[in-house]
């Protein structure tokens, strides 16, 4: 056992699924050292190799089916979905190291969704972390669950386990492997970002994993502000009514305090990551917007802010009071969230009023994404002007800035900042990351060198712009510390992204030099960059290829923490296969992701996918395609850049939808008139 003392400390961690169904290579460059495997279970020795049931289920070595070799582990007698094979990894996992966990799963009969998770306990407190979310499994083939897990604090119980979403069917497990890539020391001979960029605090979004060992050293060296990425959201701080828990956030805030860092509190009110009880009446029915509903919801909101903001007092200098309240497609510009549907604009008024009362010294922000898009920007401007006119205490506009290597233009970004200057509000860049992808159809196992260069120029140009407007911009935060832990690995699709200043092994990228010293762009010896043999872009002579066009559609970066997935297999022609996933869910709304695979022999040029929604769902917004909907019938046509699907290839699109009642998965799809297999 290493570094795992019995300590009654709070644990925080990061768990990020990197792929489902197929094995995905974790982005590591060709000259990275080979991963070190710390544990394997192949079951070839005829035993259960230390695996136990989580309840009374029966585990046995089996030769009925096997993924590799001739043996696997069979799990029978499950009586609840949470029952499943479980392995003690307390002595295997070292704090602060990102482990890749890979396991192969197969049902004995029928279909379900399987999850790979970790249970950890400190004292009497148990926590359950999803490493790989719901992934379709069946009795027909083996499915690989693979994801990352980093333990951020000492625990006294740590088990990896597999469970299912809906049924208690028997299942098989095989070829489990846990590995890590050995860490590199952080570079201490390079300038500190916060010492170079002195116009405003420079921050990073963090989980517990960013505050320990090498990550903690890197964070403290370069940043003087932090934003807990999830720990202050409603589902973390008030999971059930009037029960406040700060076990996730407190250690992060304590770390910031100890290192003299500013803290951005994110976020008091959002439509995602908010438990459903908030919008549920005492009798268990959903609020509809009656006067009584409104009174109850506003009192819950007030109680929430009073408790959370008071708990942190002056330690949190800035709050994202409300997050993502704008919908530029509504004529009044207001997102039809449950908050809005029940209270109109009053939830925003109440949130700011109470936040000011409880945290009178804190800067209070309204935060949103895609504020560089003219329509969104203007709707946000109109709302802030109106509310400020009413005396609502809004101090600050937060621009999330989830952007990519070719979008948005510098001109649009400058217009975004200029727009709010006359309002006299502070402006903060709150969640910046620069994806290497320009649409959700792309996926690279290793970041291509040309994309990393483009990214460096984007960082260079954007930071130059922020410094030019230093009198308006009072904080710039990146949505993560290093590429080994970024939400973009699973959003909008599962693929390895590299959107930050430091690579997966914590080494400075060209992006870092774009911020710190642009003359050094392209000179980095970071393994992530040097190994990519892809393009002919000359790092030394290139002119900025950056941000002059706006070729991509803007996509909603909002997500929900509870991905739900279900499938209904049907037979098809074999020429196409469709994977439809509900990737986010909140009261009355959901986010979907659809993948079309060309399983035929020839290429597809131009596609039209049609289906029918059985639950009366309506698509509100769609990216990487164009949608038309008539009643229940939906047709999605390719966008200009993703019409071709090579034989064996695939394209994807995503959307936001609304529904009332249930949200069943469509049972059948046709592609250009031909029925597809549903996966
Ligand atoms: C993201 C987190 O980074 C993820 O870990 C989580 O699963 C979903 O939310 N806009 C926001 C942030 O305001 O709260 C979101 O954070 C990213 C988009």
Image (cartoon, grey):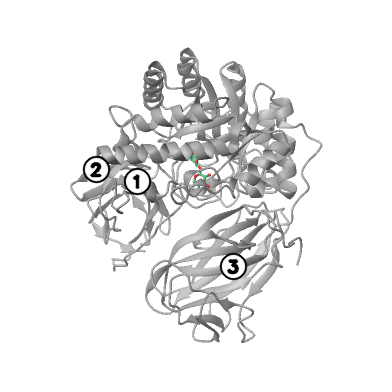
The residue depicted at 63 percent of the width and 69 percent of the height is 177
Q: Residue furthest left?
A: 631
Tag 1 residue: 279
Label 1 packing within 10 angstroms: few (<14), some (14-19), many (20+): many
What residue is disc 2 on? 628
Neighbor class of circle 2 (other Cα within 10 Å; few <14, some 14-19, many 20+) is few
For the question of whether residue 482 can be seen, the reply is no
Name the quadrant of the C terminus.
bottom left
Horizontal side of 518 relative to 605 (left or right) equals right
List x then y, in percent, for residue 203. Answer: 63, 33
676 and 270: which is toward the camera: 270
Question: Of the residues under marks 2 and 3, which one precedes in the sequence?
Answer: 3
Number of marks present in the image shown: 3
Residue at image location 56% in from the left, 42% down from the top: 229
Q: Earlier in the sequence, mark 1 or mark 3?
A: 3
Q: Nearer the viewer, residue 649 or 185?
A: 185
The answer to whether one can see residue 147 in this image is: yes
Question: Which of the two marks, 1 or 3, is nearer to us in this view?
Answer: 1
Q: Is residue 286 left or right of residue 60?
A: left
Q: Which mark is residue 565?
A: none
Of circles 2 and 3, the one toward us is 3
């Amino acid at each position: 056992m290493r570094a795992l003392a019995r300590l009654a400390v709070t644990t925080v961690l990061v768990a990020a699924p990197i792929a489902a169904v197929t094995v995905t290579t974790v982005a590591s460059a060709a000259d990275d050292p080979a991963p070190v495997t710390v544990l394997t279970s192949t079951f070839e020795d005829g035993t259960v190799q230390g695996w136990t049931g989580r309840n009374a289920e029966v585990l046995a070595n089996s030769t009925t089916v096997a993924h590799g070799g001739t043996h696997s582990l069979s799990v029978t007698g499950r009586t609840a979905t949470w029952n499943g094979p479980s392995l003690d990894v307390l002595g295997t996992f070292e704090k602060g190291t990102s482990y890749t966990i890979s396991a192969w799963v197969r049902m004995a009969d029928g279909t379900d969704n399987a999850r790979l998770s970790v249970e950890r306990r400190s004292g009497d407190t148990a926590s359950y972390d999803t490493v790989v979310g719901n992934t379709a499994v069946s009795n027909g083939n083996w499915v690989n669950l693979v994801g990352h897990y980093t333990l951020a604090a000492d625990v006294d119980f740590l088990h990896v386990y597999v469970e299912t979403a809906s049924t208690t069917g028997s299942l098989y497990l095989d070829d489990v492997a846990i590995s890590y890539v050995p860490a590199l020391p952080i570079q201490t001979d390079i300038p500190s970002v916060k010492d170079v960029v002195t116009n405003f605090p420079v921050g990073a979004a963090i989980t517990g994993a960013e505050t320990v060992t090498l990550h903690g050293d890197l964070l403290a060296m370069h940043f003087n502000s932090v934003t807990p990425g999830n720990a202050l959201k409603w589902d973390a701080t008030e999971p059930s009514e009037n029960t406040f828990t700060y076990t996730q956030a407190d250690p992060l805030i304590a770390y910031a305090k100890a290192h003299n860092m500013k803290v951005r509190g994110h976020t008091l009110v959002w439509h995602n990551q908010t438990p459903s009880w908030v919008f549920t009446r005492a009798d268990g029915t959903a609020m509809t917007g009656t006067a009584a509903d409104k009174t109850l919801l506003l009192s819950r909101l007030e109680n929430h802010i009073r408790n959370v903001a008071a708990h942190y007092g002056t330690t949190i200098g800035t709050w994202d009071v409300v997050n993502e309240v704008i919908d530029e497609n509504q004529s009044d510009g207001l997102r039809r969230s449950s908050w809005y549907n029940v209270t109109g604009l009053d939830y925003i008024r109440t949130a700011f009023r109470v936040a000011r009362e409880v945290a009178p010294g804190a800067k209070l922000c309204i935060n949103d994404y895609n504020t560089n898009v003219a329509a969104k920007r203007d709707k946000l401007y109109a709302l802030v002007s109106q509310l400020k006119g009413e005396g609502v205490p809004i101090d600050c506009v937060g621009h999330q800035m989830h952007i990519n290597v070719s979008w948005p233009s510098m001109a649009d970004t400058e217009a975004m900042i200029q727009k709010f200057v006359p309002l006299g509000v502070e402006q903060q860049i709150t969640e910046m990351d620069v994806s290497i992808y320009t649409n959700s159809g792309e996926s690279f196992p290793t970041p291509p060198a040309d994309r990393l260069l483009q990214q460096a120029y984007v960082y260079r140009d954007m930071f130059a712009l922020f410094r030019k407007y230093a009198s308006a911009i009072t904080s710039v935060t990146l949505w993560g510390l290093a590429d080994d832990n970024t939400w973009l690995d699973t959003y909008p699709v599962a693929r390895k992204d590299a959107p930050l200043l430091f690579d997966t092994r914590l080494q400075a990228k060209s992006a870092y030099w774009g911020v710190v010293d642009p003359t050094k762009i392209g000179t980095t010896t970071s393994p992530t960059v040097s190994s990519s043999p892809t393009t002919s872009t000359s790092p030394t002579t290139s002119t900025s290829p950056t941000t002059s066009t706006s070729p991509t559609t803007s996509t909603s970066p909002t997500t929900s923490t509870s991905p739900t997935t279900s499938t209904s297999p049907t037979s098809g022609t074999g020429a196409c296969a469709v994977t439809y996933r509900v990737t986010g869910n909140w009261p009355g709304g959901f986010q979907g992701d659809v993948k079309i695979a060309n399983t035929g022999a020839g290429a597809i040029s131009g596609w039209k996918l049609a289906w029918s929604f059985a639950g009366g769902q309506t698509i509100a917004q769609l990216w990487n395609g164009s949608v038309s909907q008539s009643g229940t019938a939906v047709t999605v046509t390719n966008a200009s850049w993703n019409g071709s699907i090579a034989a064996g290839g695939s394209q994807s699109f995503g959307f936001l939808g609304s529904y009332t009642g249930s949200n069943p998965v469509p049972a059948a799809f046709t592609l250009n008139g031909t029925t597809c297999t549903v996966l």
